[in-house]
Image: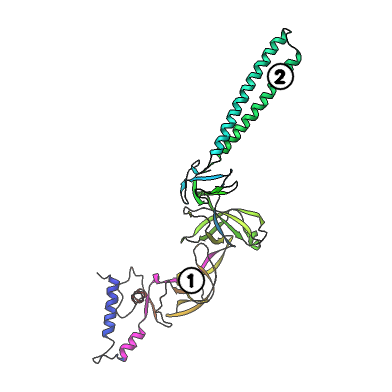
C-alpha cells in the first residue's frame, strides 16, 4: 500500500502529465508557463535560521588511545616454551597461567638445594650437640678450653652454611616459579609473541596484557597552544573506527616537550559511558579551552564543490544558491562557523537536493503536522526530495 505522501505525489505527476499537451500530444504554451511559475512549498521543518551561537574553541589534539594498565610479560629464565595457554583477545584473571616453560633443570636444582639444606641442618644439629657435651666436660675440668672454642667455631660455621643452603633453596624455587608466566591483573591478552617449541631467552617478550577498562587518550598539542591547556578542561574527539564522538577531561599536561617534535603530551580521561574497547587507535579532537560567538550552520545544509561550499537560501521569496566561507568547526555539535556569505536571520534549506534550481519561487507554509494536504499544482520540498530519490 502506498503511503499518503507518495500517493499525493503520484497524483501530482499524473495530472501534470495530462496537462502537458493537447489533443495532438504537444505541450501547450499555457501549461508550460504554469509549470515554470509553480512555487516550491517550504515548511518550518525544511529550513534552518542562521543565528549566533557559542562556538567552542581551543587547540587541536592528536594521538592514540592507550591503556593505563598494561604489562609486557618477558621470560626471566632461559628455557623452551612448552605450552601457550592463552590467545590474542582472550580475557584473563589475575594469576591465570598464560604460558609454561620447560622446568626440568630448575626442578633438579630445587631438589639439589633442598638436599643441601637438609644436610646443612643435620651438620648444625650435630655441631650443637658436640658443643653441649664439651661445655659439660669443661665444667668438670675434663676438656680443654681450646676444644670448647673449636666446637663453637664448628657450630657457627654450620649455622652459616645452613643459611646459605636455605638461600640457594629459595632462589631455586623462584627460578622454578618463573617458568610459569601468569597474568598480573584482570585484563585481555593483546599480543602473543611465542609459540610452542620456541626458545625463550632471558628478556624475550612472551605476551602483552592490557586492562581495557583503563583506556585513556594520550594526545599531543603544539608548543604554541600549550599555555591554553589546563587540567580539568573538556575534550571532544573522534576515534578511527567509531562513529560517535567521545568526551574526555584533561588529567595531566606533561611538563616537558618531546625532544623531536617539540609537542607536549596531554593525558585525557574518558568521562562518558561509551568507551572504546580497542587500544592503539588514532584519535583527533579539540580541547575546549574557550568559546566565542559566531554565526553557525549545520553540516547537512552545506553542499561541497571542490574547495568551495554553498547553501540554498531563501531570499526575497526565491531560492538562491549562495556561496559561503566557513571557519572552524564546533567540536561539540559539529556545526561550522560562517565567516562570509550569510547574515543572522537568513533561512537556509536544511537538507538540499540536487534538483533545486536557482531562482525558484518559494512559499513558506505551515508545518507538515498542521497543514492540509498540498495542492496538486504546488510542489513541496518533501515531494521534490521523494521524486529525486525515486530517480
Q: Is residue 123 visible?
A: yes
Question: What is the x, y in percent for residue 219?
Answer: 58, 58
Quadrant of res 339: bottom right
Question: What is the x, y in percent for residue 166?
Answer: 62, 29
Q: Quadrant of the N terminus?
A: bottom left
Residue at 33% in and 85% down = 35
* Whole-number angstrom distance, CA of label 2 to CA of label 1: 100 Å
* Front residue (pair 133, 295): 133
Please state if 368 lies on the left or on the right of 132 as rendered.
left
Q: Is residue 316 visible?
A: no
Question: What is the x, y in percent for residue 368?
Answer: 34, 70
Please state if 13 lies on the left or on the right of 234 as rendered.
left
Please state if 317 lies on the left or on the right of 69 as rendered.
left
Q: Eyeballing the image, is 344 above or below 214?
A: below
Residue at 60% in and 56% down = 266
Mark nearer the N terminus (2 vs 1)? 1
Instruction: Tell which tag, 2 or 1, sits nearer the viewer.
Output: 2
Question: What is the x, y in percent for residue 184?
Answer: 53, 43
Residue at 61% in and 55% down = 230
Decide whether residue 47 is among the magenta residues.
yes
Residue wearing tag 1 = 50
Residue at 64% in and 54% down = 254
Q: Quadrant of the C terminus?
A: bottom left
Residue wearing tag 2 = 152
Q: Which element type, helix, strand or loop, lies under badge 2?
A: helix
Quadrant of res 354: bottom left
* Front residue (pair 215, 376): 215
Residues shaded magenta: 29-55
Decide whether residue 353 is among the magenta residues.
no
Amino acid at each position: 500500500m502506498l503511503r499518503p505522501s507518495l500517493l499525493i505525489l503520484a497524483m501530482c505527476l499524473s495530472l501534470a502529465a495530462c496537462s502537458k499537451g493537447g489533443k495532438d500530444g504537444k505541450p501547450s504554451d499555457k501549461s508550460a508557463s504554469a509549470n515554470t511559475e509553480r512555487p516550491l512549498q517550504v515548511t518550518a521543518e525544511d529550513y534552518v535560521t542562521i543565528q549566533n551561537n557559542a562556538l567552542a574553541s581551543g587547540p587541536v589534539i592528536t594521538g592514540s588511545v592507550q591503556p593505563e594498565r598494561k604489562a609486557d610479560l618477558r621470560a626471566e629464565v632461559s628455557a623452551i616454551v612448552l605450552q601457550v595457554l592463552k590467545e590474542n583477545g582472550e580475557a584473563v584473571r589475575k594469576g591465570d597461567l598464560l604460558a609454561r616453560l620447560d622446568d626440568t633443570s630448575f626442578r633438579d636444582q630445587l631438589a639439589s638445594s633442598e638436599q643441601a639444606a637438609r644436610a646443612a641442618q643435620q651438620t648444625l644439629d650435630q655441631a650443637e650437640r658436640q658443643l653441649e657435651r664439651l661445655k659439660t666436660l669443661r665444667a668438670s675440668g675434663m676438656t680443654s678450653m681450646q676444644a670448647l672454642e673449636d666446637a663453637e667455631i664448628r657450630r657457627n660455621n654450620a649455622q652459616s652454611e645452613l643459611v646459605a643452603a636455605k638461600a640457594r633453596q629459595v632462589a631455586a624455587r623462584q627460578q622454578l616459579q618463573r617458568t610459569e608466566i601468569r597474568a598480573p591483573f584482570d585484563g585481555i591478552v593483546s599480543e602473543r609473541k611465542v609459540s610452542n617449541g620456541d626458545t625463550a631467552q632471558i628478556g624475550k617478550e612472551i605476551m602483552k596484557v592490557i586492562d581495557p577498562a583503563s583506556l585513556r587518550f594520550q594526545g599531543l598539542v603544539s608548543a604554541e597552544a600549550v599555555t591554553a591547556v589546563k587540567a580539568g578542561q573538556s575534550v571532544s574527539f573522534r576515534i578511527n573506527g567509531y562513529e560517535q564522538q567521545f568526551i574526555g577531561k584533561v588529567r595531566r599536561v606533561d611538563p616537558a616537550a618531546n625532544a623531536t617534535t617539540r609537542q607536549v603530551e596531554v593525558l585525557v580521561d574518558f568521562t562518558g559511558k561509551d568507551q572504546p574497547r580497542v587500544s592503539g587507535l588514532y584519535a583527533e579532537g579539540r580541547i575546549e579551552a574557550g568559546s566565542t560567538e559566531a554565526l553557525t550552520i549545520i553540516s547537512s545544509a552545506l553542499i561541497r564543490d571542490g574547495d568551495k561550499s554553498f547553501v540554498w537560501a531563501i531570499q526575497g521569496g526565491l531560492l538562491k544558491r549562495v556561496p559561503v566561507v566557513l571557519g572552524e568547526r564546533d567540536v561539540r555539535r559539529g556545526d561550522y562557523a560562517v565567516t562570509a556569505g550569510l547574515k543572522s536571520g537568513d533561512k537556509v534549506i536544511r537538507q538540499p537536493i540536487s534538483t533545486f534550481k536557482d531562482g525558484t519561487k518559494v512559499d513558506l507554509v505551515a508545518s507538515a503536522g498542521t497543514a492540509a494536504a498540498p495542492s496538486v499544482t504546488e510542489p513541496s520540498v518533501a515531494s521534490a526530495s521523494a521524486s529525486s530519490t525515486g530517480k
